[in-house]
Image: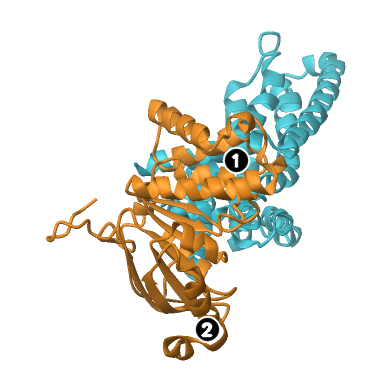
Chain colours: A orange, B cyan
Amino acid sequence: MTTSPTGAPAPILQLDRISRRRAGRAAVQQLSLSLRPGQVLGLLGVNGAGKSTTLSMIAGALRPDSGSIRLDGIDLREQPALTRTLLGWLPERAPLWSELTVAEHLTAHARLRGLNGAAQRTACTAVIDRLDLQPLTRRLAGVLSQGQRQRLGLACALVHRPALLVLDEPANALDPVQAAALRGLIREQAAAGTAVILSTHLLAEVTAVCDRVAILHDGCLRHDAAVQADDHPALERTFFQIAMHGDATARAA
Amino acid sequence: MSALADTFAVARLEWRRMVVRPLSWMLAALTLAWLAWNFTLLLGGFLAGQVQRAALPDGPGFTDLVAVPLLGQLAQLSFLVVPLLGMSAIAGERRNGTLPLLFAAGLPASRIVPGKYLALLGWLMLWLALTLAMPLALAHATDLDWGKLASATLGLALMLAALAALGVACSAFAPHPAIAAAAALIIALALWSVNVGAQMAGISGGVLNWLAMSTHEQPMLRGLVSTADLAWFALLIAVALALAARRLDNERERG
């Protein structure tokens, strides 16, 4: 991690006017954002607002048509392999290899992220313990419940201790106890210096764990501000104004 | 991490997925049982005609009558087995939604594709080795033509490698594993028999004959290894894998 001349940690992630077209329409347009270590950014927007496309681009699974993505100050186009060590990604619906066990998933992800031997075993054990996956380690991913799949996806994203954690609707299919545990985990990661981007439809989730919130609408960033813990009604108002009327009305409000 | 380590990480993951998939075991069991049955038939025929052949000065031996025909049967089976095994390599990942996970691990297509290919190739080489073990088990009791057997084995290994590369390429292009398998089967059969018309017309040279896989495979099954045939297989493998890698790169670009 680098430090800025002022002593504050330099952004781990910088998006500079990234755009991306998908299925013939502009999914993301001129989006600029930055995130510092330890910050938790909530990404809100209605379905089709461009959240998942944005996260896929940050994760390196999709290339932007224009603009740049910098991880720890380095352009992803120049060094796409940066995502391997710096970034952990939980895509929507946690895609898994149904024929592999939970333990095999973690080993495979650790290996793909460059961990081998003792480091790999230590990392897998740590994440299994942290996410209470011990009873499931020998179970095939194909037979896991949706909540268990989500926890395994999260464990895979965390196994190599990334500096930036990208979570696409991680609370989907989690019961209230698991959702509370997820919030605790996000706070814990942030306290350890990991930057987190959390895409969600749950406004309460944002006010509970996020420092900042960004709202996307039609692929454009309409709102980027700090979040207060008791800010839920104001956030809800802003979100609905943007969702229903777009940027101008939201500003007027 | 080096390119080689990346490729092996993908290969290990793919290998693991293959060995736990029932389809791989079912295909291995059925084809090896079929080959073992045919081996006993070929061996029976060989033993039955032994007395007559003893009178011939340069008569065909165990290698010509049992080992090479057995490998020929493996070659026939491979047209069906390789597309079925290779169909999920990339199309299955795409359908499963796990392909972006490999992209997000910072792996370029030029490492994902060879990794998938190596795993498939490993399985096929094991299949070939188990088939080869049948005639080799009788090596102490027969007079094997080691040169011819080595040439036929090399030819078959190259054919399996080429079909595997085609299978991976079709899997990279097809949206669904079943479509990938069908495409790989059709392309492989077309590539094998593209010169049938030319041969029926009595033309033994030309582009079509050069293009046909049979032109390069059959001499090796007869014990003739030429650099041109080796180069043809190497070229086919390289082109198929390069196309697959390019397709994956485009996919990352296009989404």
Q: Amino acid at mark 2?
A: Gln
Q: Is residue B221 visible?
A: no
Mark 2, other Cα within 10 Å: few <14 / some 14–19 / many ≥20: some
- Asked whether B127 or A130 is in front, the reply is A130
Q: Position of residue A109 (x, y in %)?
A: 49, 41
Query: Residue furthest toward the front?
Result: A230
Looking at the rendered structure, which numbered label has been put on residue A241? 2
Mark linked to residue B107: none
Could you tell me which quadrant the C terminus of chain A lies in?
Answer: bottom left
Q: Amino acid at mark 1?
A: Leu
- Graded by Cα atoms within 10 Å as few (under 14), some (14 to 19) or many (20 or more), the crowding at tag 1 reads many
Which residue is at 41% across, 27% downward? A117
Letter of the chain that mark 1 sits on in the rendering: B
The answer to whether dots 2 and 1 both sit on one chain is: no
> Whole-percent x and y of residue A65?
41, 75
Residue A47 versus residue B174: which sits nearer the camera?
A47
Q: Quadrant of residue A214?
A: bottom left
Name the subunit of mark 2. A
> Disc number at residue B120?
1
Q: Residue at x 67, y 31 (%)?
A: B127
* Viewer-proximal residue among A191 and B65: A191
Helix, strand or loop under label 1? helix
Question: Which picture quadrant has residue A68?
Answer: bottom left
Q: Is residue B69 left or right of residue A34?
A: right
Q: Return the residue nearer the eye: B2 or A116.
A: A116
Return the x and y of residue A246 as percentages of the image width and height: 50, 87
In the image, is B108 to the left or to the right of B28? Answer: left
Secondary structure of the residue carrying tag 2 is helix
The residue at the far left in this view is A5
